[in-house]
Image: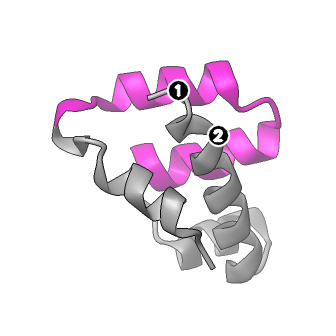
Amino acid sequence: METPKASEERSNIDWDNITNSQIDHLISEYIHSEKYRRVLHLRLVDGYTYERIADEMLMSVRQIKNIVSKAEAKLFKHL
């Protein structure tokens, strides 16, 4: 479950003004795990659903949601 602070940080980000290349750059710069980078890229840049990512990465949907949540929290610190 996400914390209220994380939820507030997400709502303050103007996603309409952030390009996919900017998101990709942030992922490359701040996410060090290859697996986390791949999952976050599929979710934020390619727009895959959690289910599709889980199928592609051979992981559970819960694992994917956990990875996305942790990795997004890292990225939001730098926006």
**Is residue 31 shown above or below 52?**
above
Res. 78 mark: 1
Residue 64 as seen in the image, left or right of residue 26: right
Q: Was residue 29 drawn as part of the magenta stretch in this picture?
A: yes
Q: Quadrant of the N terminus?
A: bottom right
Q: Position of residue 8 (x, y in %)?
A: 39, 58
Res. 74 mark: 2
Q: Residues within 10 Å of mark 2 (few under 14, many from 20)?
A: some
Q: Residues within 10 Å of mark 1 (few under 14, many from 20)?
A: few
- Under circle 1, the secondary element is loop
**Are the residues flagged by discs 2 and 1 in contact, CB closer than 8 Å?**
yes
- Residue placed furthest toward the front: 5
Res. 64 in view: yes
- Residue placed furthest toward the left: 16
**Is residue 4 shown above or below 33?**
below
Q: Was residue 21 drawn as part of the magenta stretch in this picture?
A: yes
Instruction: State the residue at coordinates (41%, 43%).
Output: 45
Three-letter code, disc 1? His
Q: Position of residue 24 (x, y in %)?
A: 49, 28
Three-letter code, disc 2? Lys
Residue 27 as seen in the image, left or right of residue 56: left
Front residue (pair 51, 15): 15
- Under circle 2, the secondary element is helix
**Is residue 47 shown above or below 3?**
above
What span is in magenta? Answer: 17-46
Front residue (pair 71, 37): 71
Q: Position of residue 54 (x, y in %)?
A: 67, 72
Instruction: State the residue at coordinates (57%, 79%).
Output: 51
Instruction: State the residue at coordinates (67%, 80%).
Output: 61
